[in-house]
Amino acid sequence: MAENKPEIPKSESNNKKKKSGGCLVVLLILFLTPILALGTLYFLNKDFKLSVNGLMSNVPGPLGAYFEKFPTRAEELNQIRIVSDYMLGLDESRAVDKLLILQKDDKRAYDDVIKDMLRINPNKTKNILEAIRLATVNKDALSNTVQGISSEEVDSLKAQAAYISGLPLTAGVDEINKIINDSINGHKNAAAIFEYIDDSAAVSLLYQLDQVDRDKIYAALSDAKAQSIRNAYSGLQRRKDDLVQIAGVYSSEAADSLINTLGDISVYSLEDLAIIYKNLGAKKAGEVLAKANNETFVFDVIAKIKANELLDSGKDLLTPDILKSLKIYKEFDDNVKELINVYSKMDTTKVVSIVKNMMLNASPSKVYELDNGDMITISDEDLILRILTSFPQDKIATILSSLDQTLSSELTRKLALPQN
């Protein structure tokens, strides 16, 4: 009969496996810890590394061949001694230059050489170290000085740019011309200032200069700034062309409606308005501006037109005619307002009588000639039409129905026509 073996409990078996695994971990730790410690020491301690390289190079086979590629401690000390002797044999200035290069390329090698030099010849080495210190300090001081000068120059250029940009255009152009003529490098100096002037202001200034001066400044500018200013100039020219076309459209519209668009800077800038009013012509410009209630606005527009004319051609022949036209239309508008106030209080029968009399017995038209040859004509008919258009529709209808058929038809036709 077979003998039954006692069965081992599973818990006891698991405990044995755990003890076996724990022993293995302990052995691995005991084995790996010194390896890791030696590896860390090898990479962090140069003397230890060189000693290991020397020992391992004696090992036969590929491992020894691999470590033979690295210098031993004795070989490296020999190399350091060769460099140290060489440096001590040089003139102090040459030794300083070469040691500075070594310091930049390999700080550890530099430190080893300096230590060896101190052991060989402490006095000369100390002199060389002092020279290195002074050279480093002087270099830093020079660099800081250059940076300081550069920063001050930039600040000065920015200040000049802000000053010139803030001047009236004619004064700014005079200032640029003065800078150009002050020295042989005048165009270069002016270009340096233009680098910090806003593109739109730079365009206004540059294109008031002589072509030769402008070209020389462009040549001295950075490529980016020159291109930026040229782009701004092209954009300005396109904008001017657009405004000339707009003025052509506006020239056929009534002054009473135009003043809603051209009577302030809500739609167009002052610069744009100066171009539009110029291209409307002196007669139309004066008629529209006469409708404006803001005298400061009118003055600013005319002043801008005058400044542009003086810059473009050196003389202003436009604004005197605009002012003359403005005065004529302003007086006419003021007279009309007074008459409208009076007629609005009169009986309709009396108004009909006055209208009929003015239509049948109209006095000769008043003609005003501008210096450019344009004629401004104001007639009784213009006065009647302005007064009638101010009345309510029912009152106009009553007046027209009270006139004979011929006068009524004529007035109706003229009231229907655009009032330019």
Image (cartoon, rainbow, N blue to C red):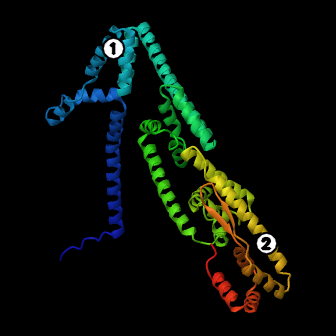
Which quadrant, please, contains the N terminus?
bottom left
**Residue tagged by mark 1?**
84
Residue 123 percent across, percent down from the top left: 44, 7
Is residue 263 visible in the rendered structure shown here?
A: no
- Residue drawn at x 57%, y 68% is 250
Quarter of the view holding residue 294: bottom right
Task: Tell me the element at label 2.
Answer: helix
Q: Residues within 10 Å of mark 1 (few under 14, many from 20)?
A: many
**Looking at the image, which is closer to me, 417 or 275?**
417
**Residue tagged by mark 2?**
337
Q: Residues within 10 Å of mark 2 (few under 14, many from 20)?
A: some
Q: Label 1 amino acid? A: Ser
Are the two marked residues, 1 and 2, in contact with CB atoms closer than 8 angstroms? Answer: no
- Residue drawn at x 35%, y 10% is 88
Q: What is the residue that sits farthest to the left in this orientation?
A: 61
**Looking at the image, which is closer to me, 146 or 127?**
146
Residue 111 percent across, percent down from the top left: 39, 22
Residue 101 percent across, percent down from the top left: 36, 22
Residue 388 percent across, percent down from the top left: 74, 81
Which quadrant, please, contains the C terminus?
bottom right
- Residue drawn at x 61%, y 77% is 418
Q: Label 2 amino acid? A: Lys
The Cα atoms of the two marked residues, 1 and 2, are separated by 106 Å
**Looking at the image, which is closer to me, 342 or 163?**
342
Quarter of the view holding residue 274: bottom right
**Looking at the image, which is closer to me, 143 or 294?**
294
- Side of 362 where 250 appears, left or right: left
Task: Tell me the element at label 1.
Answer: helix
- Side of 276 where 292 appears, left or right: right
Mark positioned earlier in the residue sequence (1 or 2): 1
- Residue drawn at x 31%, y 18% is 80
